[in-house]
Amino acid sequence: MLLSEMKEGQTGKIVHVGGNSILRRRILEMGILQGTEIYIEKYAPLRDPLEMIVRGCHLSLRVEEAAQITVDGVK
């Protein structure tokens, strides 16, 4: 499942971070690494961007960026 497909309140684990090298590096530097647990806090009113909690920090990503991240074990 892609991160952009998750709904508010769901939790999952990062399996793969894709994208071009610049985008991928930026995402990895934010702490979104393989095996990290992620929680979708909320979406903006027009569903872009999304706010998530990663390692206790609130982060926001555009939906098109979140579509580059694969997640597993969604609850």
Image (cartoon, grey):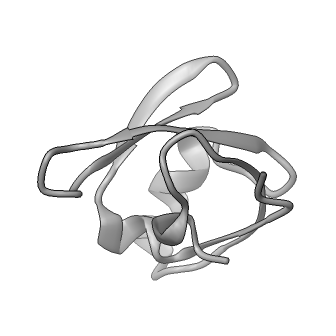
Q: Find residue 58 and report its horizontal and vertical position in percent.
A: 46, 24
Residue 70, image x, y percentages: 67, 73
Which quadrant holds residue 63? bottom left
- Place residue 23 in its image quadrant: bottom left
| Left or right placement of residue 46 versus residue 37 in this view | left
Q: Residue at x 81, y 57 (%)?
A: 34
How far from the left and from the top, in percent, is residue 52? Answer: 49, 37
Residue lying at 51% horizontally and 77% vertically, measured from the top left: 68
Residue depicted at 49% across the width and 76% down the height: 21
Q: Is residue 24 visible?
A: no
**Is residue 35 depicted above or below 3 in this figure?**
above
User: Which residue sits at x=56%, y=65%?
Assistant: 3
Residue 7 vertical placement versus 44 (above, below) = below
> How far across and how far down the image is residue 66, in percent?
45, 65
The quadrant of the picture occupied by the N terminus is: bottom right
Residue 45 horizontal side relative to residue 34, left or right:
left
Camera sees residue 50: yes
Q: Nearer the viewer, residue 38 or 8?
A: 8
